[in-house]
Amino acid sequence: MKPQSRYLIASVVLHVLVFGALFISAFFHREPEKVRIIEAALIEGGGQKIPNAKPVPPKPAPPEPEPPKPQPPTPEPPKPQPEPPKEDPVKKAEQKAKEEAKKEEERKLAEERKEKKRIQDEERKIEQERIRADAERKRQEEAKKKQEEAQAKAEAERIKKEEAKRKAEEEKRQQQAIADDLARQEAEEQKAIRDAQAKRAAQKAAEDKARADAALALANAEEQERIGAAQATWLEQVVAHLRKFWVRPVGSPGSFPCPLEIKIRPDASVVSAQVRRGCGSAAMDRSVQDAALKARQLPQPKDPRAIPSDGTLIINFCPSPSECGR
């Protein structure tokens, strides 16, 4: 509950209690006693005391005359005061009753004023409390408002700082992204350059290899051709050498080719000889093989490369160059 509501309720309850007390006191207030008026008759010469009659006060003694002064004239003596009139008891009683009623009225008025003052004091106190509560509430509201404003300002500053930080980070991220893109583009360009250089180098190497292979093939071909030529020349020498050891069998034809396989050592010495295909008869086959075995040592070629690496020499034996159909 707010302080204003509490103060308002307290004020209403206090007023109800005050007016209730005044209302109840109206029923229990004692009325002033009525003045009893006594009637009496004065009897002359009776010497009897009059009831309820107050004695007549004695006449006041005249003041003594002042002593005469030498120079000023003697003042006139004061005139005797007239005898005060006798009071009427009825009137005196009525007057007393009026005075008491007046006093009672004044007392009531005083009590009412006092009660009114008390109520006013209470109301003033309540009002002061309300004003103080309102001032405290306003102070608290002002303090709360200032605190909220300070918090709002701090929050705004925080948001501003966070926004600035976010913008700085975003700018940094964008700059980093740009730098990364530039680095990536440069890396890609460098890679493209390296790839192109590698491709050109590979192409050049391939071309060089192709040229080298072609040159080597040409050299090998030429070499093989030279070896083949040297080998052909040497084989003719071998066949001619074998004819020296060949004995023609009786009844052999004048011309026949006889393929002969000879196993030789690197020094061209004969290891074995075997006719690969029949020369026409068993006697002819044996005669050719025997000629190779009898030779034992074949002539050395001028070019050592003419000797096969596996030591297998295949020749086409003929009785004479003219008989081989050259």
Image (cartoon, rainbow, N blue to C red):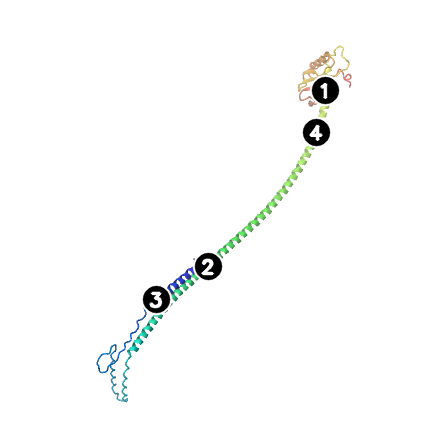
Sooner in the amino-acid sequence: mark 4 or mark 2: 2
At horizontal 35% and vertical 70% (from top left) the residue drawn is 108
Query: Real-space Cα distance between discs 4 and 2?
Result: 106 Å
How many residues crowd around disc 4 within 10 Å: few (fewer than 14), some, or many (20 or more)?
A: some
- Whether 32 is drawn above or below 224: the answer is below
Residue at which label 3 appears: 27
Mark 2, secondary structure of its residue: helix
Amino acid at circle 1? Leu
Q: Which mark is residue 141?
A: 2
139 lies left or right of 223? left
Q: Quadrant of the N terminus?
A: bottom left
Amino acid at circle 3? Phe
Residue 118 x %, y %: 37, 66
Mark 1, secondary structure of its residue: helix
Q: Which mark is residue 217?
A: 4
Q: Which is in the foreground here, disc 4 or disc 2?
A: 2
Disc 4 + disc 1, Cβ < 8 Å: no
Q: Which is in the foreground here, disc 1 or disc 2?
A: 2
- The picture quadrant where one finds residue 276 is top right
Sooner in the amino-acid sequence: mark 4 or mark 1: 4
Count the labels in the image.
4
Residue situated in front as seen by the camera: 15 or 204: 15
Residue 275 x %, y %: 71, 15
Residue situated in front as seen by the camera: 195 or 88: 88
Sooner in the amino-acid sequence: mark 3 or mark 4: 3
Residue at which label 1 appears: 235
Sooner in the amino-acid sequence: mark 1 or mark 2: 2
Q: Which mark is residue 79?
A: none
Q: Which is in the foreground here, disc 3 or disc 1?
A: 3
